[in-house]
Amino acid sequence: MDEEMRIAEIRGGALSAKVMDYGANILALYVDTKEGRRDIVLGYKNLCDYQDNDPNYGCTIARYANRIGGGGFSIDGQEFHLQKNDRGKNTLHSGNGSLQRRRWEIMDSSDDHVSFSIKSPDGDLGFPGNMDITVTYTIRDQALIIDYSCICDQKSVFAPTNHSYFNLRGEGMGDILDTRVMIHADQFTHTDADSIPDGSLVDVTGTPMDFRDFHRLGERIDEDYEALQQAGGYDHNYVLEKTPDLHAPEYDHDGKMVYEAARARAADDSIEVIVYTDLPGMQLYTGNYISGQDLGKCGKIYPRRGGVAFETQFFPNAVNVKTFEQPLVEADRPFHTRTVYRLLTE
């Protein structure tokens, strides 16, 4: 990289995080436990490796997270064509050279928060409108709060997420198959063989996709079930329940209600992460394509399935499936969404 990366550390209580301006990226998330300080997200030992970062460790994904079928979409009859960087026919995470591969500007920082911003011009990666994007990380009451905001001078789409991989035993401490997960979802979005949703929803009942009660990730991950076989494990969007008992009013903002989406527990119960969001979906991704070649911060090579991501999101391909909640932003109208990762320890 031409310039030295700018890294900020934020903290509060038993939680702290390191973030950097390249990709508005989470480098580390530390939790104080009885056994000592533990970094629970994956990342590279050498900062220069973030230039490639094919797994997207810790990245802010924008303008559009996950997949867009056919590499394009239309708004009010106008077609927009994107890079087909996924199997040569679809768009994944906005395309190559997207915002997670660029330097953001640090706008504001203090002991417990930092804000990054970036300008994405009209036509950038094929998306319409001049868009100003901000992501703010705040630590409060044992939680990492992520706020995404944008404003655009044209009607456009905005569907961000964070792509951190968690290993609650500590980064570099093997795979995550013994992690227990619960997801508040009765359905997931059906996809074709290229992981593109077609608009239909699948009931999780009686399937290895059912996480309404806690299950170890490795318990059913290799079962002979079509959705798992297609993706090489879990890499699926869950349709989140938003019932009154899941409402988390302490995280509400701008008239939007935030709900508990999922929980994950270390095998020894030493750490639990609770995920909250105002978005309709969450991608559970078990690192099926981690190559087994990445040198982690601890000096160990990360194995396949060495981390699990909980990517809160609009549904993949929503711009082409009008029955899904639409990730549209109106011209000159601010948009704001929030995701929270709350950490509990013994």
Image: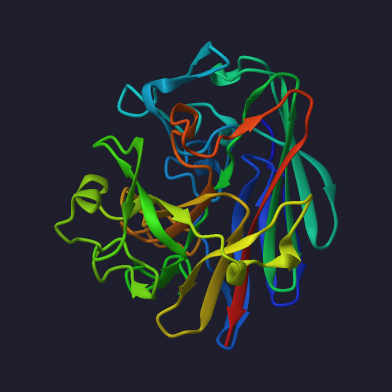
Out of 20 and 270, give the one closest to the viewer.
270
Residue at left offset 28%, top offset 68%: 218
Residue at the left extreme, as displayed:
224
Out of 103 and 318, give the one closest to the viewer.
318
What colour scheme has been applied to the protein in the rendered image? Answer: rainbow
User: In the image, is residue 248 above or below residue 202?
Assistant: below
Residue at left offset 44%, top offset 31%: 321
Q: Position of residue 40 (x, y in %)?
A: 53, 67
Q: Quadrant of residue 120?
A: top right
Judge left or right: residue 29 versus residue 269. Answer: right
Judge left or right: residue 230 versus residue 59. Answer: left
User: In the image, is residue 311 above or below residue 166?
Assistant: above
Residue at left offset 37%, top offset 22%: 70
Q: Quadrant of residue 200?
A: top left
Residue at the top extreme, as displayed:
78
Asked if residue 114 can be seen in this view, the reply is yes
Judge left or right: residue 238 versus residue 275. Answer: left
User: In the image, is residue 267 above or below residue 102?
Assistant: below
Asked if residue 163 can be seen in this view, the reply is no
Tag count in the figure? 0
